[in-house]
Amino acid sequence: MAKTKVLLVGESWMSSATHYKGFDQFGSVTFHLGATPLVNALKDSEFDLEYMPAHEAVEKLPFTMEGLSQYKAIMLSDIGANSLLLHPGVWLHGKTVPNRLKLLRDWTRGGGGLVMIGGYFSFQGIDGKARWHRTAVEDALPVTCLPYDDRLEIPEGFRPQITGRRDHALFAGIEGEWPILLGANEVVARDRDDVEILARLPQDQGGHPLLVTGRHGEGRTLVWTSDIGPHWLPNSFVEWPGYARLWTNVLRWVSMAV
């Protein structure tokens, strides 16, 4: 049986460091892939996962509805809106290109499954630089973004509080207590009949939404406001049997049109 084609966008970065040793100094640059835990978890699943790192998405994320429609689900994870708005043709040469944020919204309305995963460049992000607030992509999500830095850094850890039905398809095969998380993005769930908050932070950490589902036209949308790997999502969560099951359930659910 053919696998369901899905796309993961983002979760990569480059770091530059300067090393000082007495009078002398030298620089180094390192490249990081933050999606490895999720890619590995879905390796033998029913999904054909294509991973497009953030620097590649700037030019390679499709500019047409036909291009997006090859995927049943698209996950945006730790990539800011500017990466999809400021194509080199726009940024360097002052040319026009299709607005991919509007295309993603319209693709979802037509039956696509859109997921946003938390991180420093998700929702509004660190210093408000992720900049998804008041965009066409936000229109399709079951939550709204805050207009400022929305990080919830919780170094002591918190345990997700399940608030949705235990028989919901997203919880199928997940047993026992969930491992701790170390942070999330603060969002506001939309007040609509189709929107369901399935998990939250504990009340002593604000009770903010963690896992929220909704609909946009004929498509399904979902947000997970924490990460898919360290630092907000520790290795203990990655190693938990429920990790792979959760993301398999997520992709199954969003891949089904309303």
Image (cartoon, rainbow, N blue to C red):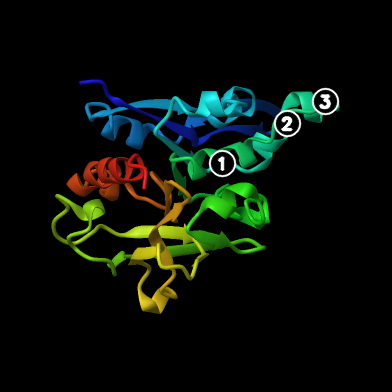
Instruction: Count neighbours of disc 1 (C-alpha within 10 A) and say few if under 14, some if 14 to 19, many if 20 or more.
Output: many
Instruction: Count neighbours of disc 3 (C-alpha within 10 A) and say few if under 14, some if 14 to 19, many if 20 or more.
Output: few
Q: Amino acid at mark 2?
A: Phe
Distance Cα–Cα, label 1 vs label 2: 57 Å
Residue toward you, 96 or 184: 96
**Pointer 2: what residue?**
23
- Of labels 3 and 2, earlier in sequence is 2
Residue sitting at x 27%, y 24%: 3
Q: Where is residue 42 shown, x and y percent of the image?
A: 28, 32
Residue 194: image quadrant is bottom left
Q: Amino acid at mark 1?
A: Asp
Residue toward you, 103 or 6: 103
Instruction: Count neighbours of disc 2 (C-alpha within 10 A) and say few if under 14, some if 14 to 19, many if 20 or more.
Output: few
Distance Cα–Cα, label 1 vs label 3: 23 Å
**Dot in front, 3 or 2:** 3
Residue sitting at x 43%, y 40%: 111
Is residue 29 depicted above or below 214 in this figure?
above
**Pointer 1: what residue?**
106
Q: Is residue 224 left or right of residue 177?
A: right
Is residue 1 depicted above or below 122 in this figure?
above
Element marked by disc 2: loop
Element marked by disc 1: helix
Q: Amino acid at mark 3?
A: Lys
**Dot in front, 1 or 3:** 1
Quadrant in which the N terminus appears: top left
**Pointer 3: what residue?**
95
Residue 226 in sight in this render: no
